[in-house]
Structures are given as C-alpha cells and as structure tokens.
Image: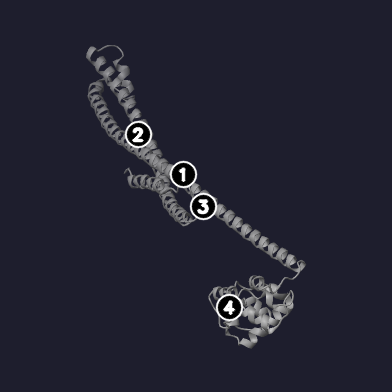
Amino acid sequence: MPVRTVAKGLVFTAGLVGLVVVAAPSTHLTSASKATLDAQAAQLSQQIASQSAEIRLVAVQASLARSRLAADRANLARGTSQLNQARARVAVERNLLVHFAIAKFTDAPGSNTVITTLNTDQNSVAAQSTYESVASGYVVNVITTYQRAQEAVASLVSYDARQVAAATQAQQLLSQDLASLQAGVANEQATLASVHGQIATLVQQQLAQQAAQQAAALAARQAALLQQQQAAAQQQAAPQQPQAQGAPSAAGVSAAVSSGGAGSQWGGTPAPPSAQAFAALRNCESGGNYQDNTGNGYYGAYQFSPSTWTGLGFAGLPSAASPATQDQAAQIEQRQGGWSAWPECSLILGLD
C-alpha cells in the first residue's frame, strides 16, 4: 500500500504556530489595538478552518489505512494457515515415503502394511513390485507438488507480511500526522480564545472609560448648572448696585487733577445733577471726548460699558452715539445709582 505523507501539513502547522507567537497581542491594550486583534482573530479562524479540513482528510486516509491493514492481516493469517497445512501434508507424505523406503531396503516385516496403506486395491503379490515403483514415484510427485505449493504459499505469506508492514507504517505515519495537526489546531484555538478575551477586555475598558467620561461630563454640567442657579439666587437676593463704569482715561484724570478738582464748586454733597457737574464728569472720564475709544472696553465721554449702555436701553457703541444721547444716558444712570456709578471721578471731583 502506498504510504501518504503529510509533511506539507506539518510544515503548515509549524508555520502557523510561529505566526501566532509573533502576532500575539501584548497584554497592554490601547484603543487602537482592537482593529489589530480583530484582524488576528479573523486570520486564526480562517487558518483553523483550513487545517480542520486537512485533519478530516488525514482521518479518512487513516481509516482507509486501518481497513487495508486489517485486510492484509487477514490475508496473512489465511496464507500462514495454508502454508502450515502444506508443510504438514509434505511431512506426512515424506514420512510415508521414508517408511516405505526403509521397509523395501531391509525387507523388514511391515512393508506390506506400507504398501497396503498406499493402495488397498492391490490383488496380487506379483503386482507389488510394479506397484512399489509406481507408488514411490507417486509419493515423490506428491512431495514435489506439495513443496512447490509450499513455496508458492510461502511467497504469498512473505508478500502479505510485507503488505502488513507497509500498512502498519502508513497507519503509524498517518496517526502521527493526525496527532500533530490536532495539537496545532488546539494551540491555535487556545490563542484565538486568548485574542477574543483580550478584545472583550479592551471593549469593557473602553465602555468603562466612556461611561466615566460621560459621568464626569454630566457631573460637570450639573455643577455648572448648580453654580448658575446659586449665582442667580444670590443676585436676586442681593440689593441692586449701580454698575461702575470704566476707569477714566489718562487725559481726563490729568485734566481733573490739574483743575484742582471740583469739590468746591458744589454747595453740598452729593452734587446736584447739573450741567456743570456732568461737564466736570465728562472732563474727568474722557477729557470731554464723546468719541473716546481707547480699547479698554469702555466707550464715549462717560466711559460706558456695553452692558450698561444696552441695559439703559440704547443700541450700538456709546462712542458712536451723539453727544445728546450720551448725556441722556448719563443722566438716567445718575438718577438710578447716583454718582457712585463713576467711583473714581466721583471721588476726585467730590460729586458724591
């Protein structure tokens, strides 16, 4: 029986195990490693499927080899039995011839018994000599025939023995190949399970990280909302204070200081909202420049902030409004909060 070798399958197994060792993912997982692990898992699954088909083929061939081995062993047993029978028959015939030869040579008593055994139909002693010659030739022919038959059966037995040896060797090789393939698939399946476990761990880590980030973001939003609510509650509970305007420009302060202040101009404190008081205020805040815009976030002759300006009901920038509009806004602000809306110039001028 031809012996099939699956050396290619064995080389494939060794190469695959090597691939698994080299490509095995590290225990330190990152969010970018999931795609790599998924690719390795897909490759391992494909290789396991291919090698499983190879295992099925080898298993079928091993089964056929076992059947052939059993048949060869049965043939060997039959041939051995026939050979033993031929040997026994040759021994019987040879024994008979030896006894006959001895009896004939010595003319010993009992030769007639041998002759009788060879042919019980002889009727006369005169025919014994002829019969003895024929019987001797017959026995020799029988022995020769059985010897040839013995040689033929021995040749068949030798052939069957070689067939049994070849079938046994094939069976052993196939069993070894099958065991190697099964061990390789078992290792690959273990590696695949490890990869799937690492993917599951990575997914759980990512989900936990996302959940923590979402929880932190929710907590931050809740904290900000609570702060806003607390600030709104405090603002509602606190008495409304007039919004202070921006610091006066350098030119305005210089003009106010050089004039020695205006405190002596008022008959008392606080100063009345007169044209003279507003003129002194404009002069202190901006040097009387209605288009003042120094880039400090405050605008116009009275250095209004945009929030104060819009809160008073006016649109645009204060520095773009007309002098009359700015004077009107200053008067409204002064009526609502007094001169303290301009704290620095109010102190310098003695308005409050």
Q: Please report contact status of discs 2 and 1: CB closer than 8 Å, yes or no.
A: no
To which residue does mark 3 refer? Answer: 199
Mark nearer the N terminus (4 vs 1) = 1
Q: For the residues marked 2 and 1, what is the alpha-carbon distance in whole angstroms?
A: 44 Å
Label 2: element kind: helix
Q: Quadrant of residue 96?
A: top left
Residue 317 visible in rendering = no
CA–CA distance between discs 3 and 4? Answer: 69 Å
Q: Which residue carries the number 2 mark?
A: 79
Q: Residues within 10 Å of mark 4 (few under 14, many from 20)?
A: many
Viewer-side label of 2, 3: 3
Task: Give the numbered dot on residue 286.
Answer: 4
Task: Please give the name of the residue rendered at 35% of the width and 29% of the height, measured from the top-left corner.
Answer: 85
**Camera-nearest residue between 193 and 91:** 193
Tell whether 66 sits left or right of 157.
right
Q: Is residue 41 left or right of residue 300?
A: left
Where residue 180 sits: x, y (%)?
40, 41
Closer to the observer: label 3 or label 4? 4
The mark nearer the N terminus, 3 or 1, is 1
Question: What residue is pinned by disc 1?
Answer: 186
Place of residue 84 in the rendered image (x, y in percent of width and height, measured from the top left): 35, 28
Q: CA distance from mark 4 to mark 1?
A: 89 Å
Name the amino acid type tagged 1: Ala
Q: Are marks 4 and 2 in contact (CB under 8 Å)?
A: no
Q: Is residue 104 above or below residue 62?
A: above
Determine contact: label 3, label 1, CB under 8 Å.
Answer: no
